[in-house]
Amino acid sequence: MTSSQLLDICDRFSGKKVSIVGDLMLDEYTWGSVDRISPEAPVVVVKVTEDSHRAGGAGNVAANVAELGGVARIVGFVGNDQAGEKLTSKLESRGVDTSLLVRSDSRPTITKTRVIAHGQQVVRVDREERKSFCSDFNNQLITNLKSVWEDSDVVVVSDYGKGVWNKQLFEAFQELSKNSNSEKDFKTVIDPKPKQTSFYRGAWIMTPNRKEAEEISGMVIEDRESAIEAGQKIIEDIQVQKVLVTLGAKGMVLVDREQGCLGAIDTVAQKVFDVSGAGDTVCATLALGIACEEDALSAARLANIAAGVVVGEVGTVAVTSEKLRAAIASRQFFN
């Protein structure tokens, strides 16, 4: 596929409506330097130079969609707390529609704090609550999902296993799929959590990474051939149409229910500093390509290039249209 063909797809991202359903989180970063060991314990002392905040989880998928020119709307929850305000503000500054977020007084915003020194993560601190959502909360999420369903080109499920994508929301999703008044072939992209696979049946495409694909299929993935076999087993077991297995330095493989392996894609990443959020970028770019009515393999090629951009930066970042286009233009031809 030529670079001009890929750039043409990017041109058509503008205005495509992608609704993201899933677990949002605030990614906090404390940046600093290390020059001594603590006298209190055998741990390093980080001298803080900067703090920053970014949208993580489903929020990062939405941020990527918006930065690439799409119309991003997000269904999920944040707490009525300072972290929720920061997260909502970050999303809105990128143009993400946050009007369908459910705000909770009893459940805090999921927050991951990473301490980074000299470009390396020293420690991560997670703040979250794992109790199940109450029925009123689920009903509000379902109502919000219904409100965007018919008006979306693609729906992305960004499932981090934090509670938003649950049995009740899946059942509503199934009912919407069955009773859709739309004449279009509606497509869903699932970024999966292995323990939640019973909630993905009937999806159009799943995007597990190597570890997730191994857990879901029960197989060991050593190379592309075994990744293809794992993808085929996932399709058979979960009854999805396609599986895109991401393999890090070994690229990606795309498997289809009827046609088998549609293709293997080599990685384009030149430098890998941090893989945090790369899966979110893959989902967002893949969804936009599908929204443009491109075939899954072409959309996956674009997603692969986008992921190659973000892994070259430290922390959770969203790929911009400018950076994606520059990465495409830097190469003359893509197989």
Image (spheres, grey):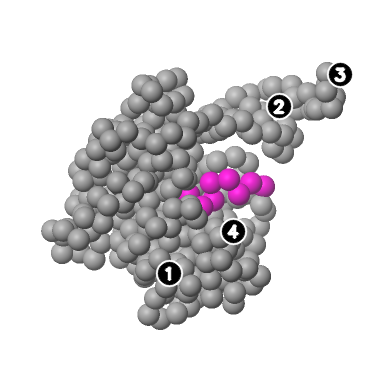
Q: Is residue 158 above or below residue 184?
A: above
The amino acid at mark 1 is: Asp
Query: Could you say which disc has been placed on residue 211 in the image?
Result: 4
- Mark 4 is surrounded, within 10 Å at the Cα level, by few (under 14), some (14 to 19) or many (20 or more) other residues, namely some
Q: Residue furthest bottom?
A: 259
- The residue tagged 2 is 32
Front tag of 4 and 2:
4
Badge 4 or badge 2: first in the primary sequence: 2
Badge 3 or badge 4: first in the primary sequence: 3
Mark 3 touches mark 2? (CB < 8 Å) = no
Badge 1 or badge 3: first in the primary sequence: 3
Q: Is residue 277 visible in this depiction of the protein?
A: yes
Where on the picture, by quarter, is residue 260?
bottom left
- The residue tagged 3 is 39
Task: Choose between 225 and 284: the one closer to the eye.
Answer: 225
Mark 3 element type: loop
Mark 4 touches mark 2? (CB < 8 Å) = no
Mark 3 touches mark 4? (CB < 8 Å) = no
CA gap, disc 3 to disc 4?
Answer: 39 Å
Q: Which residues are magenta?
A: 273-281
